[in-house]
Image (tube, grey):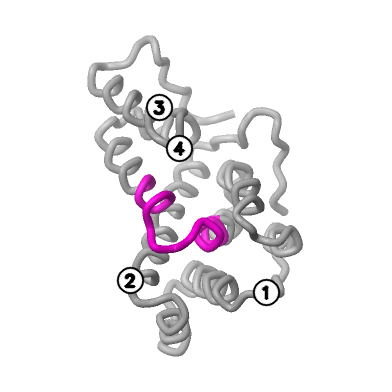
């Protein structure tokens, strides 16, 4: 059960209605999870959803790599909602099921693609060590490009905000999906 009851769409303030409609009519199509929590503070919801739209749909990273970074973030934060929301997207984007399973169980995935390996190592290292070494940074820039590393860092920061919101407000996985993270 969530700590904060969902905002009732029938009783929104004018600003909440404006933001609710902006989210609902965008690529997400729904207002749920952390976005529903943020709607309690509509200006936060508005700004966060705009950043999220960029991170998810407009960054230089292809969906295969951004979804891998999102799964790494969900696992580090043990964010069940985020894991449930992005696992099928990551699989559809081309992340191998064995890699998804290794991340889910806290194992070390074995990658066939160098870009996937660097995105995962960068993501996990930044989350666990709170920085990346010069060597890891250089490897990421050499493989992905400097601008893509900026986008990757932004994605990791945004999905950390998502995961923190999910964890603080105890947002459960979407209806009918059992928890999967160990």
Which residue is at 65% across, 46% downward? Answer: 88
> Could you give the CA–CA distance between mark 4 and mark 3, rounded to whole angstroms?
14 Å
Q: Residue 111 — which label?
A: 1
**Upstream in the sequence, badge 4 or badge 2?**
4
**Mark 3 — residue?**
24
Residue 72 at x, y percent in the picture: 57, 61
Look at the picture and state if 47 lies above or below 152.
above
Looking at the magenta stretch, what is its main secondary structure?
helix
- Residue for point 49% across, 67% down: 127
Mark 2 and mark 1: span between their CA atoms?
Answer: 23 Å
- Left of 86 or right of it: where is 32? left
Looking at the image, residue 161 lies above or below residue 130: above
The Cα–Cα distance between marks 1 and 3, rounded to whole angstroms, is: 36 Å
Magenta segment: 52-70
Q: CA distance from mark 4 to mark 1?
A: 31 Å
Which image quadrant for residue 170?
A: top right
Q: Badge 3, how many Cα within 10 Å: few under 14, some, many 20+?
A: few
């Amino acid at each position: 059960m969530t700590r904060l009851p969902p905002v009732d769409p029938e009783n929104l303030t004018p600003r909440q209605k404006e933001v609710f409609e902006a989210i609902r009519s965008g690529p997400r199509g729904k207002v749920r999870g952390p976005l529903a929590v943020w709607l309690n503070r509509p200006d936060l919801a508005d700004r966060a959803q705009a950043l999220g739209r960029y991170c998810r749909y407009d960054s230089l990273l292809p969906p295969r790599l951004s979804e891998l970074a999102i799964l790494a973030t969900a696992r580090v934060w043990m964010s069940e909602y985020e894991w449930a929301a992005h696992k099928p997207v990551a699989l559809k984007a081309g992340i191998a099921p064995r890699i998804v399973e290794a991340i889910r169980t806290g194992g070390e995935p074995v990658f066939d693609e160098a870009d996937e390996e660097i995105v995962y190592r960068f993501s996990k290292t930044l989350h666990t060590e709170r920085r990346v070494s010069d060597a890891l940074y250089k490897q990421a820039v050499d493989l992905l490009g400097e601008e893509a590393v900026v986008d990757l860092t932004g994605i990791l920061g945004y999905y950390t905000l998502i995961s923190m919101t999910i964890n603080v407000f105890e947002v459960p996985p979407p209806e009918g999906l059992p928890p999967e993270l160990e």
